[in-house]
Image (cartoon, helix red, strand yellow):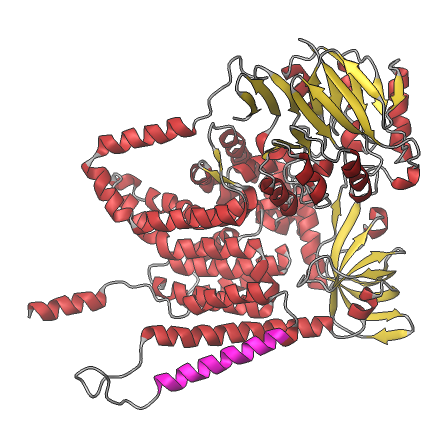
Amino acid sequence: MTASTASVHAVAAPRLDLRLLVPALVAWAVAATALPCPPGAQLGVAAGLGAVALSVRRFLRGPRGPTRGDHPGATWTTAPAAQVGLSAAACGLVLVAAAGHAAVARAGEVPTLAAERAVVQVRGTVLTEPRTISRADERADLVVLTLRVDHVEGRGERSSPRTPVLVFATSPDEWSQVSWRSRIEVAGRLGPPEETGAATVAVLTPHSAPRLVQRPTVLLGWAEHARSRLRSAVDPLPADARGLIPGLVIGDTSLTPTELTEAMLDTGMSHLSAVSGSNVAIVLGAVVVLCRCCGVRRAWRPVIAVGALVGFVILCRPEPSVLRAAVMGVVGLIALSSARRSSSLPALGVAVLVLLCIWPELARSYGFALSTLATLGLVIFARPWGDAIAGRLPKRLSLMGDAIAIPLAAQVVCAPVIVLLQGSVSTIAVLANLLAAPFVAPTTIAGIGAALLGVLWLPIAAPLAWAGALPAWLIGRIARVCAEVPMGQLDWVDGAPGAWLLTGLTVVVLLTGPWLRQCAGQHPYAVLALLALLAAAAWPVPTPGGWPPTGWVVAGCDVGQGDAFVVPTGPTSAVLVDTGPEPGLVVRCLDELGVETLDAVVLSHFHSDHVQGLSGVLDAMPVGAAYVTPVRDPPGEAERTLDLLADAGVPTYPALAGDQMQWGSASARVLWPLPTTSARTGANEGSVVLDLTSGRTRILFTGDIETMAAAQLRRAVAGERFDVLKVAHHGSAVQDRELVDGLGAQVAMIGVGADNTFGHPTPSALALLRQTGAVVLRTDTDGDIAVLETEDGRAVATQRD
């Protein structure tokens, strides 16, 4: 009887149903790997996997013959074999879908015309909301959108494909009337995409203004009207609330202050200002509660909830990211439901497979990875961790168990992907999300109400907008305060190695969790001592005298997406190389460095991200002289800058190769541009390149030079060594490998803005710098940066640490 009872207990124990999830995850990994391959190769792999699946199925259903054991009736059927068969079938299904999508997208004349860079006339449907991107220089802003081309004419050929192309337009005013799902006609030049396997088959550069052929449907027009009314309703609110309410409700972050966006990224709260599974769960939960309060019959509640979900998706726009969030939100609710929790893992597996079949490009989407992993964390860990935490809290606080476990589970599972994106580990994210959680639902519900009522009459939406203002403002305050917490962000190994390292550590901690908890209970003082030791080891040690560090020889200012570097020439004097895009930021940096006068300002070129801070510098302190590039490009910014210097009475000289300067303790020589360099080279290639010596440290300032100038510079400095390299063009992909390798720099300094739209610094540039062995300092992650000389050589310091 005892054995029988034990057997019953063993069967009844809760188990994770991985039968569908494992094949889905394997199919995801295979799809991410195979996505850049041609459709034919994908179909070939799919056929092979289909053969494997059929072979396994036949193997599992084969005759039950004697085995090597003592039981003649034993079967060869095993769970691992079944998983292999299901995984092969799932991979084959996803690859067939991917090949089908790719074949449809590449059908027609668009790929051929793109390879020939032909001028064409196209007509199609706008698939994404047009986004305006500032290029931080004198070039016009870019309008970026995805267009599904269904008619194309070019080179005497006509075709009616269904081909997605990426549009880069340089006239925002001409595209202001183009909206999501509208049909347009436009002429332009096609070109091939930058990446193999990209979701778009070609790039279109328009040559004319778009002609609106058809507006979106009435339903989508209503949704756009509601979105517009929501933005109008929140217009009178404080800045943080005005930006967060549209972000939480419809994923519109255009009104969010830049500082708040950075704070939410640093604290792991950025998912709140995007349409995510949590938004869907809040909407569905609110509808179910409302139905219960109104006495709606239980049988009708799911129907009403589904209807509300469809309406919410339409309001947010049914783009792939929104539909993905809707699916994952439903799976998350299933995971947190006591009645259907056992179905959550199979539901997640089905959701992953369905989404990958409909949109194969999601296999390489970080948003899809984060959404899926967060849902997986909720499914596996949220309920048991919540119960465990609740069991250790007073009874009246037991509800806090789930509130703590949900953000903790999501953060633990998503941390490796976040490291891949940010290069750091957030120690404050769980606490920040826990503090913000009570205010998310009121903000979302009030915002949805304001959007819906605003369609009827805007004045009645204002009270609801103000009702959501307080919780939204509190979310913003939590993000800003938590972003300032010391050690809220811990630096981690960059790139894939860092992600795999954190994944391994996470798995080890999860597997050894019970043993570690037992050890902690038995030796609490040893655990406290270990935690204190780890904190002491990670806590940044301030340099004597604070900032700036003693003995600094060059400093980089955190001025956003731009360059501003300072070299001391005396106790309170310095040389400034470029001024960044914001006058206030560069002046702040100079004040903190103790600079009272500038012997010189060197302006590498006239793009606004290098010269627009000049007005603040001229107002704040005396400037002895200015050295500028002879390449007057762009003309408007060059003229404005030279007028500023003339009005301030600052002597201005062209900097040409061969010129030498001496400023106090610093000396320099100009390596580029040559006296023969013309304006046709462009602003970046005409950047002033400076070989500057400060103390015992030799620094190479490279402005924004690109391929041509870098090749000339490589020949000019062949065989010479530098201690510090100011990386060209904010760490763009256009780096001269031979030049960087040959310099032998110990430190690489990058002036770059956080969350910039250019992808700077690029992974290829960072990988190149790591290969040279240089210590990389970045103003986007490190704030103000400095290189200093010590008795033992050189050291680096950052203001944030």
Residue at horizontal 52%, vertical 67%? Answer: 30
**With 692 as the anchor, is 325 left or right in this view?**
left
* Residue 100 rendering spot, x and y as whole percentages: 64, 75
User: Is residue 42 located in the magenta-colored stretch of the structure?
Assistant: yes
Side of 246 relative to 394 (left or right): right
**What is the magenta segment's predominant secondary structure?**
helix
Instruction: Give the total of numbered labels.
Output: 0
Classify 121 as above or below 645. below
The region drawn magenta spans 41-61
- Residue at 33% across, 74% down: 79
Q: Quadrant of the N terminus?
A: bottom left
Q: Does 246 sit left or right of 612 as displayed?
A: left
Q: Looking at the picture, does residue 330 appear above or below residue 71?
A: above
Which quadrant would residue 159 be assigned to in this image? Answer: bottom right
Is-magenta flag for residue 520? Answer: no
Q: Position of residue 553 (x, y in %)?
A: 64, 19
Q: Quadrant of residue 43?
A: bottom right
* Depth order, front residue of 467/599: 599
Q: Position of residue 266 (x, y in %)?
A: 53, 37
Residue 311 seen in the figure: no
